[in-house]
């Protein structure tokens, strides 16, 4: 399990989650940062993996990890983009 992963779901009734997921992937794509999109709706084990890495039994997508290192959620991601600390946030240096 190495590399950047964005935990998301393709099955949600929440407009907010959909918009947050697409914003994260749009920003990563725009900065040409490679990542793997992990759809937790395909397998409960993936949801548990995401929640374990996040250290939160109620964590919801999007959640971002680099290998087994938890980076953060949408709010922390946006903060890192605004403060121009995305590389550090994603643990890419």
Image (cartoon, grey):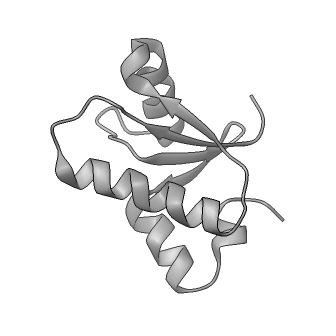
Q: Find the residue positioned furthest to the left.
A: 13
Which of 33 and 61 lies nearest the eye of the viewer? 33
Q: Quadrant of residue 55?
A: top left
Q: Quadrant of residue 67?
A: top right
- Taking the spot 40% from the left edge, 51% from the top edge, the residue there is 21
Which of 51 and 30 lies nearest the eye of the viewer? 30
Q: Position of residue 66 (x, y in %)?
A: 69, 46
Asked if residue 33 is positioned above or below residue 18 in the image, the reply reads below
Q: Position of residue 30 (x, y in %)?
A: 62, 68
Asked if residue 45 is positioned above or below residue 91 in the image, the reply reads above
Q: Answer with left or right where residue 39 lies relative to residue 27.
A: left
- Taking the spot 51% from the left edge, 61% from the top edge, the residue there is 26
Quarter of the image containing the N terminus?
top right
Q: Find the residue positioned furthest to the right.
A: 93
Q: Answer with left or right where residue 60 lies relative to residue 37.
A: left
- Taking the spot 39% from the left edge, 14% from the top edge, the residue there is 44
Q: Answer with left or right where residue 26 lies relative to residue 29.
A: left
Q: Answer with left or right where residue 75 lies relative to residue 14.
A: right
Q: Position of residue 7 (x, y in %)?
A: 49, 38
- Taking the spot 76% from the left edge, 41% from the top edge, the residue there is 3
Q: Find the residue positioned furthest to the bottom.
A: 83
Asked if residue 89 is positioned above or below residue 63 in the image, the reply reads below
Quarter of the image containing the C terminus?
bottom right
Which of 70 and 29 lies nearest the eye of the viewer? 29
- The total number of labels drawn is 0
Q: Position of residue 70 (x, y in %)?
A: 59, 47
């Amino acid at each position: 399990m190495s590399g950047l992963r964005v935990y998301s779901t393709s099955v949600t009734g929440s407009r907010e989650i959909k918009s947050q997921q697409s914003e994260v992937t749009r920003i990563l794509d725009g900065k040409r940062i490679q990542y793997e999109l992990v759809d937790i709706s395909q397998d409960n084990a993936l949801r548990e993996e995401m929640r374990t890495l996040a250290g939160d039994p109620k964590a919801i997508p999007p959640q971002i990890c680099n290998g087994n290192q938890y980076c953060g959620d949408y709010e922390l991601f946006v903060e890192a983009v605004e403060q121009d600390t995305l590389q550090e946030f994603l643990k890419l240096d």
